[in-house]
Structures are given as C-alpha cells and as structure tokens.
Image (tube, coloured by chain):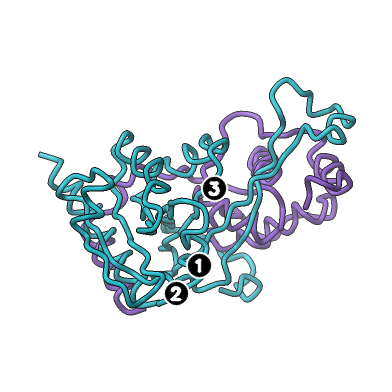
C-alpha cells in the first residue's frame, strides 16, 4: 500500500479493523518464512526497546552499561479490503520475552503454532501458553523434507492436544499451503467462539 | 544492532524527551491511529511527528506506524501519546474479537484469504 498516494485531508469515517494473528513455535521452525510467504509486503520489522528494571531512563550512562536490550518483532499484513487487515505477528523465540507474548496475544483472533516433527518439544511452550489463556490455535506441522509424511495423530498425542484442535500439514514456503493454515485457523476461531457462546 | 551502538538510542530518547513510555495507557499494536482534521500547522513539529501525521491520514495500526518510521514501538507510542494529547490524532482501542468479527466480516476475511 502506498501511503504517500492518499489524498490530503482524507479522513476515516468508518472504523478500520486490524485482526491480529500470532505465529508461534520454536526457534528456526519457520515463523518468519511463513509470515514472508503470505504477507503482501516484505515483513515489517520493528523493535521494542527494553529498559532493565530499576534503571532510570534519564540515566544516559545506563545505556552504555547495556541497561537496554531490543526485541525484534517481525510482522506481515494481508489487506482484505480498505480498512480491514490481517496482521501476522511472529512471536519472539526467547523465553525471557514472554511478556511480549502477553501484549501480542491481547485481543488476538488466534494463533498458529508451527511444529517440526524432529523436535516437537520446541512447540510445548506455545501450546501451553495458548491453552492456558483460551486463545484458539491450530498446529501447523511444517513438512521441511517435503517427501516424508507426518502422521497428525502422532503429533496430537505427542503434543497432548485436545481432539478439536486442528492439525494442518503445511509447507511454510508455499503460499497456498500457508493460506490453508490461516483459513483453518480463522474458521476454527470464529466457529469455535460461536459454539462457546450460548 | 541498536544494542551495541548507544548513539541512535540517545537520539531516540532525545526525541521523546527521555521518556521510555507514553503517559497513561499504552496503545495496542493494532490500535488504529487516524490523523484528524485538515492540514495542520506543522512548522513546529519535528520530522518524526510530521511523518506520523502523514502516514495516519489513512487509518493505520500502531505497529505499522512504528515500521514506517523505523522507530521502536515504545518510542512510537510516546510520539503517538503526544500527538493525541495535542488533538492531532485519534487512537481507537481495539475491541474484543468477539465483538468485532461478525458474520459479515468473517465471510469477508475467509473470501479474502481464499482469493490469495
């Protein structure tokens, strides 16, 4: 989208809506690739600057003593129409950034937990996180090798997933495949919410 | 990396007067920022503030504003807080998903995804 091309003085009357979807999973499982595959823009990048607790932000010397650190945050966008977007946020991998997850997860429609069958245990923290907070999620099994078939039932058992949590085999480099994962998530999140409400 | 070079950091916090976070509530990543009113008298505003007003003539989520400006999120939030206090922008807090995604929007999203 070209922001510079908008007419001067244009104002929004109808409310715009950005729907947040999280892409989670262990380090190197393909989160950034997935966002890049489906995003209409090159994944955007921003950073959260963190001040260590107890350090006065006005204390410039604190900057030099590594009192600040940065969390990289990559995200992509899918425009459904003017004023309606899906935003895909890759979750920071390191455990010490869990608090960033809380912010990311707030108001999210749902999440994709990417899994690599060679190291399924890397997906446990994400599964636990979304289960505990009641955030709808689907598991995307990234088929790195392409040839080997993975058995969703085994993945479900290994991850201790409820019977209703969708498991989708996917290739995060393939646009149609990523699209299917997201379609599954949106359907599951919306229809699941509908079922939960009397 | 910003972490290894304090120069940009010092400049960023100079931009916000040393403030690391906005006064009052923090804005959600997908809270929608919209520039309000017609052309402002912008001569007094520093470039980053003017850039926000330019980007947000179209309603734009906070994360997108940060990415456009190439600024960290919390610095962006300080700028947005200032602009809102001065009445230059409105920031619409996202409503819970259950309230925003009705049948119509759900269909739109699904159709949009399928057409990708």
Q: Position of residue B50 (x, y in %)?
A: 75, 56
> Chain B shown in which color?
purple
- Give the Cα distance between marks 1 and 2: 6 Å
Q: Is residue A54 left or right of residue B101?
A: right
Q: In this picture, is A23 found above or below A51?
A: below
Q: Are marks 1 and 3 on the same chain?
A: yes
Q: Are marks 3 and 2 on the same chain?
A: yes
Q: Residue A14's image quarter?
A: bottom left
A163 or A157, which is in the foreground?
Answer: A157
Mark 1 or 2, nearer chain start: 1
Residues at circles 1 and 2 in contact by the CB criterion of under 8 Å = yes
Q: In this picture, is B105 found above or below A98?
A: below
State the SS at label 3. Answer: loop
Chain letter belonging to callout 2: A
Q: Position of residue B36 (x, y in %)?
A: 60, 53
- Which residue bears the numbered disc 2? A173
- Which residue bears the numbered disc 1? A33
The structure residue drawn at horizontal position 52% and vertical position 53%, both measured from the top left corner, is A27
> Dot 1, how many residues are within 10 Å of its Cα: few (below 14), some (14-19), or many (20+)?
some
> Dot 2, how many residues are within 10 Å of its Cα: few (below 14), some (14-19), or many (20+)?
some
- Give the Cα distance between marks 1 and 3: 14 Å
Q: Residue B79's image quarter?
A: top right
- Which residue bears the numbered disc 3? A92
Chain letter belonging to callout 3: A
Q: Are marks 1 and 2 on the same chain?
A: yes
């Amino acid at each position: 989208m070209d922001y510079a091309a908008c007419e001067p003085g244009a104002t929004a009357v109808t409310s715009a809506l950005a729907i947040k979807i999280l892409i989670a999973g262990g380090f190197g499982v393909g989160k950034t690739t997935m966002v890049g595959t489906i995003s209409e823009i090159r994944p955007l990048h921003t950073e959260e600057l963190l001040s260590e607790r107890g350090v006065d932000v006005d204390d410039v010397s604190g900057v030099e003593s590594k009192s600040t650190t940065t969390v990289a945050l990559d995200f992509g966008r899918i425009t459904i129409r003017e004023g309606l977007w899906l935003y895909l946020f890759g979750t920071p991998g390191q455990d010490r950034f869990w608090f960033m997850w809380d912010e990311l997860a707030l108001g999210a429609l749902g999440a994709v937990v990417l899994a690599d069958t060679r190291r399924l245990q890397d997906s446990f923290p994400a599964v636990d996180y979304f289960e505990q907070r009641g955030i709808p999620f689907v598991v995307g099994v990234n088929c790195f090798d392409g040839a080997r078939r993975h058995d969703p039932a085994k993945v479900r058992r290994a991850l201790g997933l409820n019977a209703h949590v969708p498991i989708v085999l996917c290739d995060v480099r393939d646009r149609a495949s990523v699209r299917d994962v997201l379609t599954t998530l949106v359907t599951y999140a919306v229809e699941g919410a509908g079922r939960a409400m009397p | 990396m910003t972490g290894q070079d304090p120069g940009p950091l010092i400049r960023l916090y100079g931009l916000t007067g040393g403030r690391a976070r906005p006064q009052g509530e923090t804005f959600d990543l997908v809270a929608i920022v919209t520039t309000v009113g017609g052309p402002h008298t912008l001569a007094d505003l520093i470039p980053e503030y003017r850039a926000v007003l330019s980007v947000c003539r179209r309603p734009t989520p906070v994360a997108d504003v940060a990415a456009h400006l190439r600024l960290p999120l919390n610095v962006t939030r300080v700028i947005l807080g200032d602009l809102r206090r001065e009445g230059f922008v409105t920031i619409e807090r996202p409503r819970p998903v259950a309230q925003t995604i009705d049948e119509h929007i759900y269909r739109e999203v699904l159709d949009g995804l399928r057409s990708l």
